[in-house]
């Protein structure tokens, strides 16, 4: 089974790791009459057929069958086996550069929702959010709140804004997450806004980064 909080891609212990290994692979040698898989040799004919029966010829074990997981055959010759990485992925602001306030300088006006988004190029399962804010001015006191999505699936236990700034603080303790796995091209989005908006030339600007597992 896929282990928490890892990417669903392969299953440890599944698949054969050499010729003749059976019981864990995607296929196993066919069973023979009187032959027990894993034994060094089939039983002696006398053990299979009592003396008062006509003895039937018992052939030796078939040659070992080498099997492998389905993805192994897709690897190029000399290519390393499928692995798993733990990598960061930036969620880029779709509008206003991720900034609220100072509208003359390109920031978002009050009441605006900014979407931070990313499309992973390989299967990606987010395990942590890092959110950093730069606040400038006396009125830049708002907290970043919002909702998180993988594709169209809300990644929260209920609808409503959560405190993204606390969840994604670099110094936060035990704020790991286990989002649904995003397949390549599926959007991972954070829809964000502020609890209070800066005025005048004051502003708040945020960056959002997801750290998670992916296959390579």
Image: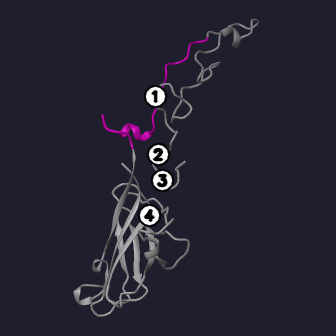
**Tags 1 and 3 in contact by the CB under 8 Å rule?**
no
Q: Earlier in the sequence, mark 1 or mark 2?
A: 2
Residue for badge 2: 10
**Mark 1, other Cα within 10 Å: few <14 / some 14–19 / many ≥20:** few
Q: Can residue 119 be seen from the camera position used here? A: no
Mark 1 residue element:
loop
Coloring basis for residues: one colour
**Mark 4, other Cα within 10 Å: few <14 / some 14–19 / many ≥20:** some
Q: Which mark is residue 52?
A: none
Q: Which mark is residue 6?
A: 3
Quadrant of the image occupied by residue 78: top left
Q: Earlier in the sequence, mark 4 or mark 3?
A: 3
Which of pointers 4 and 3 indicates the residue nearer the eye? 4
**In front: 151, or 131?**
131
Residue for badge 1: 18
- Outermost right residue: 52
**In front: 136, or 155?**
136
Mark 2 residue element:
loop
Q: Would you say 16 lies left or right of 94 here?
A: right
Q: Residue at x 55, y 48 (%)?
A: 1
Q: Residue at x 54, y 26 (%)?
A: 29
Which x, y percent locates residue 150?
44, 66
Q: Residue at x 33, y 57 (%)?
A: 121
Q: Earlier in the sequence, mark 2 or mark 4?
A: 2
Mark 4 residue element:
strand
Q: Earlier in the sequence, mark 1 or mark 3?
A: 3
Q: CA distance from mark 1 to mark 2?
A: 17 Å
């Amino acid at each position: 089974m896929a282990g928490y909080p890892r990417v669903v891609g392969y299953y440890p212990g599944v698949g054969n790791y050499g010729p003749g290994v059976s019981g864990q692979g995607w296929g196993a040698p066919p069973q023979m009459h009187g032959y027990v898989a894993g034994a060094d040799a089939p039983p002696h004919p006398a053990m299979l057929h009592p003396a008062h029966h006509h003895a039937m010829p018992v052939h030796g074990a078939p040659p070992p069958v080498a099997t492998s997981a389905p993805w192994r055959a897709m690897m190029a010759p000399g290519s390393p086996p499928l692995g798993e990485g733990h990598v960061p992925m930036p969620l880029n602001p779709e509008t206003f550069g991720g900034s609220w306030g100072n509208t003359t300088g390109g920031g978002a006006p009050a009441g605006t929702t900014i979407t931070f988004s990313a499309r992973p190029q390989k299967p990606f399962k987010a395990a942590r959010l890092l959110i950093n804010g730069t606040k400038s001015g006396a009125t830049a006191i708002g907290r970043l709140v919002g909702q998180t999505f993988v594709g169209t699936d809300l990644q929260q236990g209920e609808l409503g804004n959560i405190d993204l700034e606390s969840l994604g603080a670099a110094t936060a303790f035990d704020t790991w997450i286990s989002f649904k796995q995003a397949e390549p091209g599926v959007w991972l989005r954070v829809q964000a806004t502020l609890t209070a908006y800066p005025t005048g030339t004051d502003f708040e600007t945020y960056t959002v980064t997801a750290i998670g597992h992916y296959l390579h």
